[in-house]
Each structure stands twice: as C-alpha cells, then as structure tokens.
Amino acid sequence: TCTTLQLSLSLLTGSKLGWSIQGHIELLNLSSDLFLACALSSLDQGTRGGGAWSALCSPMLASHASCLLTHCAKLLTVFVHIIEGKDPDVHAHRRMLPRSKAMDNMTQKIKGGISLGGDTPTKSTLSKDGLGTFNQQSSYNNIYEACKSAYTNYQVSLQLVGEDKFSQLLLAVHTTLAGVLEFALASDVGKHVEELLGLLAVSVRVDPSGSLLCVQQLLNALFGMNTAAQHTPLFSPYITSLPYTPYTSGPTTTPPPQANVTSIFDCVMTEPQRLLMTSWLRAPSEQELGGVKSVGATTANKPLNPVSAIKDYLGYFEPLVVDAMNQFSYTSSVLLQQRVLFFLVQLLHLKVRYSLLDLDRRFLDSVLKLTAVMESRAMRGAEQIVPHLFQFLVLLANDSSRLTTIPEVMQKCDAVMASGHSVTTFAIPALQPLVLNLFVRPGAQSGPDLATQRDVVVNMLLRLVEHGEVISLLTFVLDCYRPIPALWNRASAQIYAALLPHIGKLQVVLDTPDALTSLYQLFAAIDPEVVNLETLFAALMKQPVLPSLRSLSRWLALLCTVLALLVTRFEEDVFASSVGRLKLSVPSVHSQLLVFNSPVASPEAPCRDLATFLIGALHLAGGAVLNIVSHARPLDDCQLPTLLVTLLLLVQALLKKPYNKLRADLVRLSPESDPLHHTFLHLSSTHPLLTLHYISMWLGAGSLHTQWIADLLTSPEPSCVGSSLLQNSAFLLVAHHARDQSLCNAVCRSPLLRRHAHADVVQEFLTRIRDSKDHTSLLITTFKTSLSHVQTTPTEDLCSVAILRQLISEDSLDLLCSHYCLHLLPSISRAASQAACEVLRVLGSVEPQLAQRLLDGVRPYKARLPQLVLLLEQLSGTPISLPIASHEKMPYVTPTQDWYLAMIRGYLADPACSGLALARLLEPLPLKDTQALLQGEVHPAILDHCLALGIDLTLGRSGARKVVPAPLHPLLEGAASALLGTLVRDVSEERAGSVCRPLVRFLAAQHQFSAFLPVADETVCVAILNVPLLSLRVCVSLLPRYEAGQLMTALDCCTLALQVVKVVSVEWSTAVIAALCRLVPEVYGHKLKVELVTSDQDAARCLGRLFTDLLPSTLTPSPPSLGISVLSLICTLSRLPHLNTHMLMPPALMTGAQDYVNPKMFDESLAESQVLLQYVQRCNLIGWVNKAQFEERWMQLLGVLNAPPPRDGVVVEELNAYVQSLSHGMEAVTTLLLSATLTPNPGNPICGAPLHTHRNQDINFLGSSPGTKLSSLRSVIEREMIARCGEYSTLQGRYQIPHRGLSVAPHHPPLFARNLERPLGSIRMGPSQLSLHSLLPIMLHSETNIGKHTSLSTRRLDVDIDSCVISLQDLVGHWLNQPIHALVLAQSLRMVLMISDLFSLPSQFEWMLLNFLGVAENHPAEDTGCQALLILGILKSAAVVQSIANPSKICDVVEKALESDSLLIQNAALYGVLYLAENHTSPLQQNIGTIVVKFVLSHLQDFSKHQESHIRLLWSVACSLLTHAHNLRDINLSTKLLEAVLPILSHPHTSSQLYQCIILGLEHLLLNFSVQTHDRTVVCSTATAVFNRAEQGKSLPSLALLLTSMYTGEEADFVSGLAAMDGDTNVLDIIIQAREHVNCILEKLRTGSEDSIAPLAEIFPQLMVDFLPKTETLNSVLTEFISVQQTRPEVAVAIMGKTFQLLMQRSEQVTIIDWVILSLESFLQQEPEERALWAVTALLLASSTNEILRNLLTLLAHWRTIPRDKLLCLLSTAAHYFHSNQCLQPEHGEPFLKLFMSSKYASIRTLFT
C-alpha cells in the first residue's frame, strides 16, 4: 500500500493528471485514503521513537505524510490568493494572522483558567520559506490558473454550494489536511500553526465546516488528543465522522479483543462462545456509552500535552474561534452549527474560560434560543445537534463563569422529553452528558445538591427504562454506587422494580445485539441480593401467547439473559430450589408461525424440568425461523436467528458448568426430539450455523446422533457456501468422536476426504486425529475395507494417497504399498510410491517381517518403483546390488566426446534421471550421435522432452535464418526417428498411454515441418494408428474411472494421426467410434444416451448421433478441456471417405432406418430452411477434403442463392422461409470461400487457422544490437504468455506448435505480429483480418511492391477463388439494385465485407465503394447493424482505392459514425480508421485524424463505462495513429494518450487480456520511437511500477514492458557499446537505474511462484551481463547461490551457468577464474556434505572452458537428487580439468589446491590425494 501511495503522490504532485481540477480531486482523495490506511496499520506496529512524524513507524510513510501536509498547505495558499484576489508572484509568502489591540486585551491570562492569548507577534510578518510557497513550481501555477477559472464560475454559478469544482477541491483539501493532522504530533506541526491557521481563516469563507474540522484537528495534534498520540480515535472528529457526516445516536459496542484464530472450526464454534461470554461478562467501558462523541467526558489513554508547554500556540486560534461563534448565530446549516458546538466543547475541555470568548453572551443566547426552537418542534435536523448542544451546556455549567447550572440543564432536558420528539434521537442523547457528568466523572460535581441531582436524573432514566440506550446509562449509575453498599442496594432495587413489569409485558426494546448485551450487563451490575430467579421466570411466563415474531424475539432475548445469569451466578441446586415451585411453561405462538408441533413441550402442558423447557424454547424459535424460510416470508426481526444461536451457546455453557441434571434430562429427551432434529436439519441449507451449534449441543450432552451426522457428512458436494461451511465444520466436530464406527465410515465416505485432501479443513481434521493412535488405526482400517465395496475415481485415489501420506503409521504404509503403489494408472502409482517413501523416512524403521512382506509385493514392479524397493531392501536386510563408488579411488577422467556419450548412455539407463536434463545433454550432439544414443528402449517421457526441446530449437533456428520452414534441429530429427522406431516395435497396452504423449507432440510438429518429417512407410502409419487406439482401450477398461490427462492425450493423438495418415481402415475407425460411444456418456455425465457399436454399419449411425447431440455445445464435459478433444476427433473421423457422405447429411433427412438420400432429392431439400441450416452447420465444422468436394458444395450453395423468389401475394411464412434459406446460403458460401485461406491445410477447420496479416510497420530497432537481444529475451516471455493466456481452439495451439507461415513477418517476434484489438492467441475471423499493406500489392499487380506481407494471390490453391468471388459480386450487385428484405441486405453486406479480403482487382474495391455509398444514402439510420457494415465497407474500400474516394465525404462518414449512440457503429468506424491510418501519405488520414483523436481520448478517459473489446479497439487506433500518422498537427498527442491510458493499468478490475493489449501497445510506441522524450520517461517509470505490483496473469506483460523500456532507453547504450560502464556522473546514474530494474527482477525470482520464475531465470543472466558491471554481476550470482535463504538452488545453478557462458563470450575467463578462487571456500563450507558436493560441482562445471563439462551443468540444474557416485565423478573430472587447464597462473593453482586439501569433508580432500 505504501508503494501505491508513493505512486499516487507522484502523480498528484508531478504529473499532468493533477492539472485538471477533477483529476486532482480524485488523486487527492485516493492519496488521502491510502495514507489513512497506511497510517492506521503503522500504529499497530509501534513507533520509531524519534525524528519527524515519529508516531509513524515507517520512515517512508513519514516522508509521505510530510509531502501531503506540504501539498495541502500549497493548495490552501493557492485558494487564499484566489479568494483574496492577490497575485502569487508578489505575495508568495507565508501568511500570518493579523492581530488587534482589542483582541490582545481579550486574551489576557485570568486566574483559574488559560486564555487564548500568548506571547505572539502583534504585526504581520512575511517569510519566504513558508510551507505554502508555490510560485516557483510550475505544476502549482497550473493548478492556480485552473482554480482561478473555477472560482469565477463559482461566483456566478447557480449551483448549490459544494457542487461546483472549486468548492469540491477545497473540500478535498480540507479532508486530506484533517487526515494528515490526525497522525501528527505537536512537534510535527508546531512551527506551522500560525501559517495554517492564517490559511484556514480565509478558506472558511468558502467551506466553513471543513475549515473548522481542520482547526479542531490542529488543536488535537497540539494537545496530544489525536490518534497519533492516544492510539485510539476516541477524541477524533475526523475518523468517526468522515466525511462530515452527523453523529449517530444509539449504542455502539466495541468488540472484545479477538484471539489468534487460525482454524475454521474455532471461527464457527469456539470463538463465538468466547466472544459471547467475554462481551457479557466484562465491565462496560465509557466509550460504549452511545455513539455521541464526548471529548469533555472522557479520560485519555495517555496524558495530554501540558497546556503550559503549548500555550504560546493558543493565541493563533482566537480569530477563528470568534469567527466560528459569529457564524453560528446567522447560519442555517445544521452541519456548521454542529461543528461549532463541537469546537466549543473541545475548548471548554481544555479549560479555556468561556466568559472571555463570549463577553456579551451573544453566542449563549443563540444556543438557548436554539433549545427553545427544538422544544417547539419547529427545527428540521435538530436531532443532529442535540448531543453536542447538551454536552456544551453541561461543560458550561462546570465552567467558573457559572453562566448556567446543572439544574437548568436538567430542566431543559425534561422539556425536551416532554416535547413529543423521538425518545431515541432527542431525550436519550440529551440525558447522556448529564449521566457522564454526575456519575462517571464524580469530581466534576460536589456538594449537597449532588445526591439530589443524581436522584432526579435516575428518575428521568427510569421513565425510559425500556430502551436499550437507557439500560446502558443505568449500568453506569450502578457502577457509580457500587463502592457504597447501601446506595448500591437501594439503586439496584429501584431499577429492578422498575424494569420487571416491562419484562413481563415484553416492552423492553431488545431488537439489537447491543441492547441484549446492555440488559445482561445491567443485571450483572445489580446487587445479587436483589435479583430473584423466581420473579424473573414468573415474568417470562406472564405472556401465554406471543402474537408476532417481534414478541417472540424479545421473549427469547429475555430468556437468554436469564440463562446467562444461570451460567455466571447460580449453581444448579440454587436454581432448583428457587424455581422448583414454579410450573415452567413455554408460551404459545400464532399457528402460522410454526411448521411442526412439539410433542416434547406444548403450551398446554407444563414442563417437567429445565431441559424440557429449553427444548420447547428451541422448538419455538426454530419452528418460527423454518416457517419464514419455507414460505419465503420477510423477516421482520433479523435478530431471531442470532438469538437462537445465542440460546444454543448458552445451553452449551450450562452443560460445561456443569448442570448434571440438565445433561441427564437432555439425554433422556433425545429419542423424543425427532421433530426438533428435522427442524434444524431443514434449516441447514439456509442457516448452517444453527444446525452446527445444535449438533454441538447434543454432543456436549453426550447424546450422539451418529446416523444424522453421518448423512450430513456423506451428502453430495454442497452447492452453496453455507452448506459447505456446515459440512466442513461438522467434519471437524466429529474428530473427537472418531472412535464410533459409523462416524468413521461416514468420514471415509465424505466428499471432503475423498476429493479434497489438500483442503484446509481436511488438514485440520488429520491434525486432530493424528495424536490418537486408535483413531488413526480405525480410520485406515475403514479405508481398507471400503476399497472392496466402493468404486473410486483417480482423483479420489490421489486424495486417499495424500491422506495416508500424512497418517504416519505402519498401517498407512501397508495400505500404500499393497494397493495404491500397484495401481494401473502411472500417476497414482507414482504418487503412492513417493508417499510410501516419505512415510518410511519419517518412521525410520519398521518390523523386518513387514518390510519383507511389502518388498515381496512391490519387487515385481521394481522398474516402476525403484526408490521404494531400495528403501524396503534396506529395512528388510536384503543385500542391495547397487555399485557404490569409492571416492578414495576416484580416477581422473579426460572429458572427451566419447566420455560424454558414455555418460549420457549411463544416464539414459537411470530411470530416476530427469528427462529435461537428458534432452539438454543431447542438444549439442550431431544427428548421428543422437540417433545412436536414442536407439533401443528409451523411456517415452525422455523422448517427449527431446521432441519439445527440438521443436523449440527448430523454430528458433527458423527465426534466426529468416527461412520458413528451416531444416530440423538434430535433436528433433533424432527423437522423431527413435519414436518411430519404438512405434514399429510392439507397444503393449501398458506402455501405450506413456507413448501417446510424445506421439502427439510428434504429430503436431509434423504439420509444421511436413517436408522434413515425412511419414510414408506403411508399417509406421499402422503403428501410428495403433498406439492411440490401444490407449483409448485402456481408458475404456478403467470406466467409470478415467484420468482426464491420459484420455485427452489419447483423443488428440487419434485426431492428429488422422491428419497424417492418409489411408485409414474401416476396422480402425469402427474401433475408435466404439470407444467414443462408451467414453462420451461418462465424460458428459450420462447426459447422452449413445448406442453401442456392434458392426461397421452401426459406426456411421452412432457417430452421427454423437455429432448431433454435441453440436449445440450446451453440454459441458468433466473437465471442460475434454470438449475440444472429443469434438475434434468426431469432426476428423467425419472427414474419412467412408463416413463423410453420411456425416454431412442433415438429421432432418435421415428419418427412421434410412441411411441413403438420393443426390437430386438432397439438392431439392436444401430449399428448406431447417435442412439447409443443419447442412451448413455440419459443413462449417467438417470442412471439405479436396477440390471436387469444394466445387460440389459450391454448386449446391449457388443453387440456393439463385433460387427464384416467391411470387407476390404469398403468405408471410413462405416469404420468411425463403429469406432464411437465402441468409443461410450466403453465410455458408462465405465460410466456404474463406476456408480456402486456412493455414496450413485449406478446407480443414480442425487443424487450421484463417490467414491473418498485421498492420504493424517493420521495427528497424529490432535489427540493432540492443534490439536483437531484446527479441531473444522477449521470445521467452511471449512463449509463456501464449501458453498461459492464449485462446486455443485448435490442437496445434494446445501443443504449442505456432503457425509460422506467411502471416508472420520475419523481422517480428510473434506478439508484434498481431493487431492489438485481437485477444492474445485468438485465431478467429474478424474485422481487419488482412492489413491494407497486404491488399495494396494485389491492386497494383506489382511483385516489387510486396513488402513484409505476402498477398493471397501468391498462395497456390487448388480451387479457383477469383471466379467464385466474381460470381458472388455479380449476384450481390443484382440484389443491391432492387428492393430486398432487410435480413438479406444485412447478410449480403456482411458477405461482401468478408470476401473483400479475397478481391484481386482494383475494380472490385471500386464497385464495393460505389455500391455501399449508394445503399448508405437511402438506408434508415435506425438499422444499426446494416449501418455498421456499410461504414466499415466504405472506409475499407476507400483506403484501398483512394483515387476515387471523396475525402470530405469520407470524413463526414467517420464523423457521423463516431457521433452515433450505437457502439456497433462506433466500432465499425474505428475498424475502418485502422485501414485509413496505415497509409501515412493519404490525405484522408490527415482529415480524419483530429476527429478520431478527440473521440479516442474521451472514451479512454471514461474507460470504466465501456466494454473491454471497445477499449482494445480504441487503444489499437491510438497506437496506429501515433505510429503511422506522422502529419497530425497535435505534437502532444502521445502525452494525452498516455494520460488517458495509464489509469487503466492501475485499475484493479482491468482484465489480463486488456492489460496485455495496453502493455503491447506501449511497447510498439517505444520500439517505433513514436513518443516524445519526456513521455518515454513516464512509460519507463510506469514499466517499473506495474512490474513491481503486477498480479497473477499480469506479471509477464509487465516484465516485457520493463525489458523494452530498458533496451530502448538510455541504458541501451551499454548494450550497443556506445557507453562504458565506468564513466561520468550521468553514466553512474544510468547504472543505478539499471541496477534498480535488475533488482526488481531478482526480488521476483526470490519470492515469485514456481510457475512464474522459469522465464525470469532464463532472461536474468542476459540482463545482468548487459546492464551491470562484470564484478557486480559475478558477485550477485555467487552470493545468491550460496545464500542461506536460497530456496531454489536449481534455478540458481541455471542462472550461474548462463551468466558465466555470456561472460566467456566477452572474453572474461580470467575474471571468472579470479571470482571462482575467491568464492570457492564459501562453496566448500556448505552444509550438509551433499549440498557442498553439489554446489562445488556446479561452480566448477559452470566456470569450465570445456564445452562438454559446461553441458553437464544441466544435470545439476534439472536433477536435484543426483546419486552420490555420479556427483563425485563429475566433481573429480571438473576439479582436475579446472586445475590443469584453467589455473595456469601460480596465484590460481596453489590456492585452488590448498582450498580442496583443507576442506572439512573427506570426499573432497581425497580428490587430489
């Protein structure tokens, strides 16, 4: 928050955003709120103990407070100059208060009081170092000019005061200043008192209330009465009344201090009981006496500053005091009168003599007149003044002037009571100051009249005893009399006697929790001898009938009070003897208030005992609540559920006391309480806490309803938060009763334990039962028993493994090894193995017999469970056949290529080795060595990593060589060859699932690199089809359980295999369809009823049924990501020759058992709208396979479009059917033509994407040295951004194989090759699909004009698109020249607009422009859909054929569109402007630029009112104008746009997609150098700020902007070599700035999440080497590696290796050796020994000049648990090589040997023995 405050203050004081009055108000309010939050939080952390603003513990916060105070003073000075009409250049001095001789005489010191006077100067002085001096600062001068204009409007405006900008800004300044003064001490503001009061004396003319608030706050700061001094807002008129709201009347209870609650169980069970008892038992504090602020009636937590120490300041307040008293007399503002009274109360509290303030008693007369007016009920808003008025009168009565007396005040209070005003808002607030004066502050009054006055006030209170506020006041009365027993007993009897009749009549107002607490506190304060339980219970039973919910609520509140007395004062025998003579009975209620009748306690029969009475009361209240819930009636009394919870808590407290008979009676009544059980069970869905406390009550009584609780635990997963809370808490409630077998069974069957093992509530449950061996054993036994009766899903199995992992015992180990480790699914088996190993490590040892038995069970699976088998062999005593290397005989190995290959071969045989590490080791090898190593049995996971890395390396090579596609990287080619070899060998069902994953990656890559990855061999094709089929069969065999990841991979593998293999057998497709028919109902939750496939003929029919059911997309699978996989496979199967014809047939034609439709009949049936719609839907999803099918479909649709229109006079239904058919036909033919542009496979919508070209210019900067490095770093970030945030609708996108085709410019990274208005990763067709620059070469027919984009005409398609477009053009031209239906017109315009991307002649765009202009002239403006299409078409065609476009007409089109109220029309115009803005030489651009800029700025400033897509489009237009429109007249356009768009970045509700769009646009502007120098500085500071505070999903774009700002700013000179690291002061400043940026990224590396640090670690070394001196770089890397707080050593290894490699490329080998020798001792001292071995090995491998050794560093970066023998081998080789080949100087070699020989570890010392 402090960082946000710092940013807000910087914008407030140094940004142009604060130059406008409205912007300054918003920033000032934001800064004020942030400061208040930070300051309140800072007070909880203590104080700094000295210095300025010492009350704030943070020095940064103290500087912010000083900045806010200075800013407010300067703004007030601005207002003073404006109000007084003075020139700031002349009067730029501190303002002093004028003083007169008359005032000096008034402020003389009087004995017995402190005057306002002091030794202050008597004439005005000027000082040039005033706090408010602003004339030398341009930003304040700009504010001055803006406020001066606003003041002119303020003087002539008819608006109410406070609604104009001038007074609003002054109000904000006063509010902010008051907030700052709340946390200031006298030492902080003492030297500014005179100046501030002088400023406030002028500002009071415009905002008197705010000015007086600041004066009060300043007075509080001087006397130590504010929050900074007292650490409580008790005295503050600011915090409690913010912003300037009247004080509330009514009791406000300060909650008791909370305990340290960390458990959900404690929150809902333990903590409510503690809070109830502590709030009722503790003595009431004076602060809880109503909501009236009473400065004069309280005692501070800390002593106030002595008046003598600050008396010199008091004279400064005098003019404002006099002015405030004068304003009180003639103002009609209730708020101002309240503020003035409060001010006077504050002064009287400080012992200021009132007679010196009001010499002529004018102010007192005004107050007395105001009192008379209130008594006559002739004043509106008087209730806001009553508390302050009577508080003032009471303090005045205690003043030495004796202008009034307490009896007179009591008389006026009595008059107010008799006036007929509301008691709660007039009489009671008037009585409160009297009670405080007479009873709470006994020293305030003394003498013989005190007792009489007290009696009078008590009698006045007893007249209103039924009100909760009065009950609180009576509690103070009793506390005052408590030291005198006789008076206490008399007052107690008097109050008890007055209260008892009201209790019997249910007249006590107990409608709030505070009123109930006040009643109990009153009973707790009454003399125990007075309280009679018999009379209390008799009063409870005086009302036999409760007519309403309110009366029932009050009765329950009184019952709770009586029960609380039983808990705290009376034992069970006392209660029995007192109430035994009474016949307890529960009152009856109206029949409509209950749902069930109680057989336990009915109103007709008296209760046998207290238990029966309480059960009846619970039934009464529970039935009433249930009746309200069941009939959806309004709850007149919201306290009824709260009172019921309180009653349940009090019953539990009685059971703990203990009330033994009550417990026994409750157990006896338990079988008879079934209706009550049902009542609370029905309430569980709406009031879960009631049900929970009801269960707890019965558990406390010892009567356990196990079946009811078991049903609650095993119910399905709750759909609402309340039900979830009930189930979770009940789950913990039974933890102490887990010995019950039925409860234990319920726990094991509960959804919580089976599906949410990592939830907090489950962890807490396991913590509670872990200490009990019996509970743990019973739970595990129940787990084991349930395995044979209950079918579980993989998710439930994983949860069970996680639970057994935490129940550390031999039983849990037995169950893990005997069942879960042998699971068929690898993920579950792997998790169970890790859990069993952890349990073994914690246990330390187990019985050898148990270890041997478990070893016999898992030994056949040793290849899958190597670590578990090893541990069990050690514990069972079985000899371990693993070679242990002896470091004493460790030979020195020369790191040659053969040794490197042998090392890799050994690691390939180790199942524990990291697959990614092996892929990195294989990366530098040539193809021959890669193929030799990967031949044979290689784990599929290793091949998967090799393929993934090989694809990345191949794509990187493509970008580097600017060749698309590039030859394959040897790693990809070798891994693909090894995978195909594995496929050709027989793959079993057990291995099919693991082979499927690398096969999917291979097939996805084959689409991209088909020229280099041919799949032509028939054996290979059969194997490719066989593996996914086997994996699908495994998934089917596991039904109804399935692992979503494995199933998704199998489905995608089938889909991609069909794209590669051209010939597919009917038997294979039938088998896949059969598997789909069994899988889909399970995946979609049995919402689909699919027949099973028994023959080849059934396959097509079943596939068609699946396609029909899934086509509406209303069903959602579990998980939802499976939907793309299922639908993609169905559509791909539908493209097979033997299924395609059947799948394209609309279901409306396939009636009964008919499987064939005559082609002629089919063509005729397309005239029906429903048939055509179904056919179009299927064609769009399935696509077309070859040219013949395209032409056939084209002729079918052309027939639909050329169908003759119906004759005149036909019925409306027939005309509508024709229009619908024509509309569907145009939509289908448009989709058909555009499908020819899909890449990489035209006509295949499943694995293809529409052609898209961006409008961005070539970024020349990316070709420079800094630009090249920036591109490589941004490619890392972009890969992560696309993986996390992209929208993927194809399998290519899912498996991260981007389409690097003709749509991507070779000079651009992928994200720079997209338009800003398109969401990240989106491949959907939309406006601006092709840029203007990709259309112009078509028009010019010149190959030399083809720039960065490649036109569509150069693509070799198999279909004649040009002829089809011309045919449609003729058809649409015929329609547009005659009257047509509105729907046909809209669809025609949309079709022309979309196929205009396929135009190949200039005349086509000319035709489009003329026809669209002609239609637009006569088309009604109300048709916004057609208008939007017309506008976009006109602007697009005008941008292409500018020679015939009329600039003024085009300008008029844009202006009218932007002025429209339709967002659709506005967006259409903006899309058209994007075309126009691309051509910077066009006169159209200059004409429309000003109009568009004004529109964009206004909408960006009000971004919260618009849709996100509209904001993206606006920002795209803005960036396009800045980049392309070089002839715009506004040179400050970039500044204005930044001011408008930067607030969007900081808005909390900005989505990640919009955030990325804005960040990418800012990067475009930086890279194209389209912003001015000072704007570039703003962007750079913004980049740092947004990266520091970036949330999840926004950190990567923020990092990209930070990198771009670094590599394009002044720091880039280091990268390009234009500046040296050691230079002048300017260079040092740049280095400091770069260091701050690098440190920001380093901090993210330390504290970021696991998934966010991977890209940071990859780019961090390059940043350090580019921007930091080499010594600082090495120091940072090595220090971070050996830091004791290092929690990610693998990341540190990777960073160190990459950094050393970059420095070696700069010939810094000697420097690296020096630092290695320097830091080697610290590495050798690491603990434990394994850590030291690992760290030293990493250091030596990273610093080695041998490329082979450096490559081995990847093992340590990706394999943390590398075996000791392999680690010692690496260390020995690296150490000897370093000593022999790199320590060539004596100052290197000898220290190196000495350090190794002196190591404390023998394994290191013997390396050089």
Image (spheres, rainbow, N blue to C red):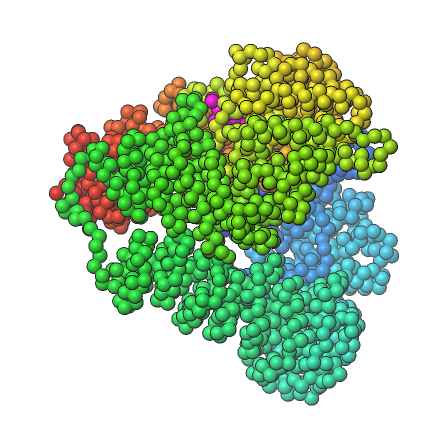
Percent coordinates x, y for residue 773 in the rendering: 39, 71
One can see residue 733 in this view: yes
* Viewer-nearest residue: 177 or 1487: 1487
Where residue 61 appears, as percent x and y from the top left, is 52, 42
Quadrant of the image containing the N terminus: top right
Q: Residue at x 30, y 58 (%)?
A: 860
Q: Residue at x 47, y 34 (%)?
A: 1062
**Which residue is more in the foreground, 174 or 1236?**
1236
Q: Which residues are magenta?
A: 1306-1314
517 w.r.t. 1773: above or below = below
Quadrant housing the C terminus: top left
Task: Residue 1311: say if magenta.
Answer: yes
Whether residue 3 is visible to the viewer of this picture, yes or no, is: no
Q: Quadrant of residue 970?
A: top left
User: Looking at the image, which is closer to me, 1174 or 172?
Assistant: 1174
Which one is in front, 318 or 1369? Answer: 1369
